[in-house]
Amino acid sequence: MKKQLSEKEIENAILDYLAYVPGVYWKNNTVGVYDPIKKVHRKPGKHHRNGVSDILGVDATGRFVAIEVKTSKGRLSDNQKKFIEDINNNGGLAFVARSIEDVKARFEREEAKEEI
């Protein structure tokens, strides 16, 4: 039986792939900042947005890209759904990827649209 990849493993594979794709892409750290003196996670500022995707970037055309990484069983939160919707409604490209193949296929579809 084939081992199910963790979200972190899928994310790392996607980031390795994106290193060879024209544009600039990075891991968006969404974990709060831990304050070792107070021994708590700091509260986010008033302009913090919940649901921001795991991988962000700008493709070679200048379009903002947001990729939410999930395992085959992973579910989107309402905040993640809203973030993806907002990016797509404002000219960006945002989607869920459950594998590196999802990213390759989505980029190929977008490239085909641009050629039309």
Image: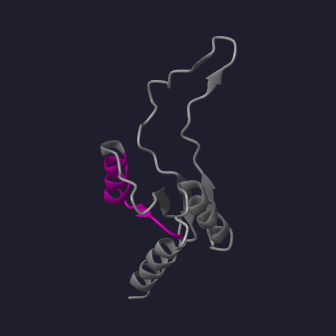
Q: How is the image coloured?
A: one colour
Residue 15 on image: x %, y %: 63, 63
Going 50% across and 76% down the picture, which residue do you hit? Answer: 101
Q: Position of residue 24 (x, y in %)?
A: 63, 62
Query: Residue 34 at x, y = what percent?
Result: 63, 24
Q: Position of residue 38 (x, y in %)?
A: 63, 11
Residue 87 highlighted magenta (yes or no): yes
- The stretch in magenta equals 80-99
- Count of picture labels: 0
- Residue drawn at (35%, 53%) of the image: 75
Q: Is residue 17 above or below residue 87?
A: below
Q: Is residue 91 magenta?
A: yes
**Viewport quadrant of the C terminus:** bottom left
The front one of 60 and 43 is 43
**Above or below, 2 relative to 41:** below
- Most distant residue in the bottom direction: 116
| Residue 30, picture quadrant | top right
Q: Would residue 95 be found to the left or right of residue 45 on screen? A: left
Residue nearest the viewer, comparing 70 with 87: 70
The correct choice, above or below, for 78 with respect to 33 in the image is below
Q: Residue placed farthest to the top in the image?
A: 38
Q: Is residue 82 left or right of residue 9?
A: left
Look at the picture and state if 58 lies above or below 50. Answer: below
